[in-house]
Image (tube, helix red, strand yellow):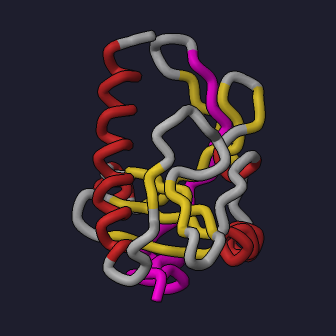
Amino acid sequence: MSDSFHQDLSIGHEAEIHVLHQIRAKYRGAVQIKVKFSGYDIWIPETSQGVEVKFDKASKRTGNFIFELEANHKPSGIMTSKAYWWVIYDGEETYYIEKDKMLKLLIMANVNWTDLNNSSGEYRKVIFLPTKHYKRYFKSNLY
């Protein structure tokens, strides 16, 4: 795997730790899932809910949150997550939304997916959600 992949993974773990500290302000038992598991990144035993954390620093520059549907022609991201909560951390602000509300929001936004190919030949199918119109549907915390 590329150095870029490992760097992105490390940044993602740092974002998870940032969000975990926020969640622990209310739910002391929350834990980061440290093994390879696509269901969610954080588990909150007090509420029996999983949390998916996405680091999206580019959203500040592009004006879009990005949601992955497929990676290399296999379902991924919102299509496979078992998380109740989705959290986007842009390096400064944290945005929380329940997965069901997020899916409804994506339908309401009526946006089409985009196919992306990077220089390594990796393929992703994603949805770009304009932040200026839809940030208001996200919360700043879980409580």
Q: Residue furthest bottom?
A: 143
Image: magenta residue range = 122-143
Compared across the picture, whether 111 is left or right of 7 comes to right
Which residue sits at x=47%, y=55%? 53
What's the residue at 31%, 34% (across, down)? 10
**Where does residue 25 sit, x and y in percent of width and height?**
32, 79
Q: Give the image location of residue 79, x and y in percent.
A: 75, 48
**125 magenta-colored:** yes
**Would residue 50 appear left or right of 62 to someone viewing this image?**
right
Instruction: Give residue 107's quadrant in the image.
Output: bottom right
- Vertical placement of residue 48 versus 128, above or below: below
Q: Quadrant of the N terminus?
A: top left
The number of discs equals 0
Residue drawn at (36%, 61%), measured in percent from left and top?
A: 89
Does 119 appear above or below 11? above
Residue 70 position (above or below residue 78):
above
Does residue 81 appear in this view? yes
* Of residues 129 and 92, the one drawn nearer to the viewer in this rendering: 92
Of 18 and 139, the residue lying toward us: 18
On whether residue 129 falls in the magenta region, the answer is yes
Left or right of residue 108, residue 13 in this image: left
Q: At 59% from the left edge and 69% from the top edge, which residue is drawn?
A: 85
Residue 137 place in picture, x, y as percent: 54, 83
